[in-house]
Image (spheres, grey):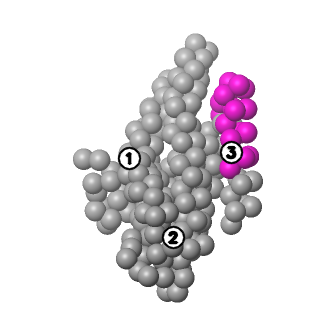
Amino acid sequence: MKLYDLSIIQFIEKTASNEAMPAGGSTLALCAALAAALAEMVAKLTFGKVKYAPADERIREITTELERFRILLMNDIGRDAESFQIVLNAYKLPKKSNDEVEIRNKKIENALKPATLVQMEVAEKCYKLFGLIKEITKIIKGSLAADSKVSLLICNTAVKGAIINVRANLSQIVDTDFTKELIAKCDMIEKEIDIKL
C-alpha cells in the first residue's frame, strides 16, 4: 500500500509513531498536494461565473496545471519515504573498523544524493505551484479569496520546508560540485518566493 492510499487518520498516526518514515519530506509533499488541491477547487468554482469570464481560459489552463502538480506531489509522498529509507539503512551499517567506516560513509553519501534530489524536486515543484496559486489569488474575489490565500501560505511553507531538508542533507555530503549546484537552486527559490509573497 502506498502512503497516499492511507486514510488521513492512518497517515497522521503513522507519522506520529516511533517509525522513522514518513517524516518531514513526505509530510511536506502531502501539504503541497493539499495546497494544489485547494487552489484547484477555488479555480473550478469560478467556471461558468460571469464575473470570471474574462479570465476563464487562463483559469482553466491553471486548473490543468494544478491537477498535474497535485498528482506529482502525491507520488512524492512515497518517493521521499522510499529514498530516505535507503539513507537510514546506510546509517545502520557497521562502523567498527576504519574500512567499515569508509564503506559506511560512501554508502550514506551515495544514498543521500538521490534522497536530496527528491526534496529538491519537491521544492522546485512547489515553487512552480506557488506561481500558479499566486496567479489564481490575484484573480479571485470575495469569499473564495481566503481559500486561495490559505493554499498560497501552505505552498510557501512546503517550499521552504523542502529547502530546509535539502540544506540539511547537503551539510552531510562531501561532493562540492553536487552541493554548490543545489545550494544555488535553493538560494534562487528562497529569494523569489520571498519577493512574490
Mark 1 secondary-structure assignment: helix
Q: Which of labels 1 and 2 is toward the front?
A: 2
State the image quarter where residue 184 is shown. top right
Kind of residue sitting beneath label 2: Ala
State the image quarter where residue 175 is shown. top right
Q: Name the residue under label 2.
A: 55
* Rendered-image quadrant of the C terminus: bottom right
Q: Which residues are drawn in magenta?
A: 172-189
Q: Mark 3 points at which residue?
A: 186
The count of marks equals 3
- Mark 3–mark 1 CB contact (< 8 Å): no
**Precedes in sequence: disc 1 or disc 2:** 2
**Residue drawn at x 58%, y 65% as measured from the top left:** 135
Q: In this view, does 170 lie to the left or right of 55?
A: right
* Spatial separation of the CA atoms under disc 2 and disc 3: 32 Å
Kind of residue sitting beneath label 1: Asn
Q: How crowded is mark 1: few (under 14 residues within 10 Å), some or many (20 or more)?
A: some
Mark 3 secondary-structure assignment: helix
Magenta stretch, overall SS: helix
The residue most toward the front is 54
Q: Mark 1 points at which residue?
A: 75
* Spatial separation of the CA atoms under disc 1 and disc 2: 30 Å
Vertical comparison of 51 with 183: above or below: below
Vertical comparison of 44 with 143: above or below: above
Question: Is residue 45 one of those drawn in magenta?
Answer: no
- Mark 1–mark 2 CB contact (< 8 Å): no
**Residue drawn at x 54%, y 24% as measured from the top left:** 110
**Residue drawn at x 73%, y 46% as measured from the top left:** 187
**Precedes in sequence: disc 3 or disc 1:** 1
State the image quarter where residue 138 is shown. bottom right
**Precedes in sequence: disc 2 or disc 3:** 2
